[in-house]
Amino acid sequence: MVTLQLRQLSVPPGHRVMLHDISWREFEAILEELGDRRATRLAYSRGTLEMRIP
C-alpha cells in the first residue's frame, strides 16, 4: 500500500479526483487537513470521495 499526503496532489482547475474505499474517518481527516478556507469541493458517498477544483 502506498500512502500519499494531500500536499503531494496537484489537480488543475476544472478537473476532479476520485478516491475509492475511503472510510468516514478518513474523509473527516481529509476535511480537517484541507481546512475551512479550501477551494476544493468535496462529495462523499458510500466510500467514494470526489474532489473537484473549480
Image (spheres, rainbow, N blue to C red):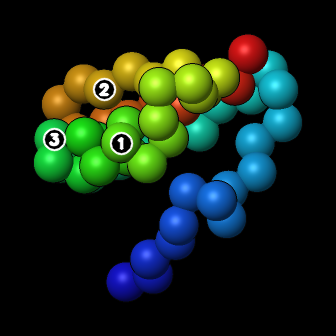
* Camera-nearest label, 1 or 3: 1
The answer to whether marks 2 and 3 mark residues whose Cβ atoms lie closer than 8 Å is: yes
N-term mark: 1 or 3: 3
N-term mark: 1 or 2: 1
Q: Quadrant of the N terminus?
A: bottom left
Q: Quadrant of residue 2?
A: bottom left
The answer to whether marks 1 and 3 mark residues whose Cβ atoms lie closer than 8 Å is: no
Location of mark 2 (residue): 44
CA distance for labels 1 and 3 = 12 Å
Location of mark 3 (residue): 24
Location of mark 1 (residue): 32
Name the residue: 76% across, 51% down.
10
* Camera-nearest label, 1 or 2: 1
Q: Amino acid at mark 2?
A: Tyr
Q: Is residue 17 left or right of residue 32?
A: right
Considering only vertical position in the picture, is 54 above or below 27?
Answer: above
Q: Secondary structure at mark 2?
A: strand
